[in-house]
Image (cartoon, grey):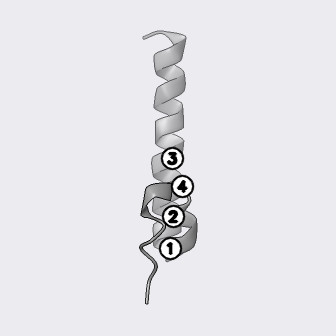
Amino acid sequence: MNIKELTDKILLRELVDNISIYGDKKDFDKQLQYFPQMQFLKPL
């Protein structure tokens, strides 16, 4: 595994961890920061 693959793996893990943490906290707005194309999906 080269340095680029290791960097990508770390960044992907960080992304998944952050999304999970925001999900656990029920912080929908912060979760949507990672999915800008889905900004129209706001909770009622």
Q: Are marks 3 and 4 in contact (CB under 8 Å)?
A: yes
Q: CA distance from mark 3 to mark 2?
A: 10 Å
Q: Which residue is mark 2?
A: 31
- Pointer 2 with pointer 1, Cβ within 8 A: yes
- Amino acid carrying mark 3 in the image: Leu
Given residues 14 and 37, the one toward you in this image is: 37
Disc 4 vs disc 1: which is toward the camera? Answer: 1
The numbered mark, 4 or 2, whose residue comes first in the sequence reads: 4
Q: CA distance from mark 4 to mark 1?
A: 12 Å
Q: Position of residue 36 (x, y in %)?
A: 50, 57
Residue under label 1, please give it. 28
Q: Amino acid at mark 2?
A: Gln
CA neighbours of label 3 inside 10 A, class few (<14), some (14 to 19), many (20+): few
Amino acid found under the numbered disc labelled 1: Phe
17 up-or-down from 29: above or below: above
Residue at image mark 3: 15
Is label 3 in a helix, a strand or a loop? Answer: helix
Mark 3 or mark 2, which has the lower sequence index? 3
Cα distance, mark 3 to mark 4?
5 Å
Q: CA distance from mark 4 to mark 2?
A: 8 Å
Residue at image coords 47%, 40%: 13
Quadrant position of the N terminus in the picture: top left
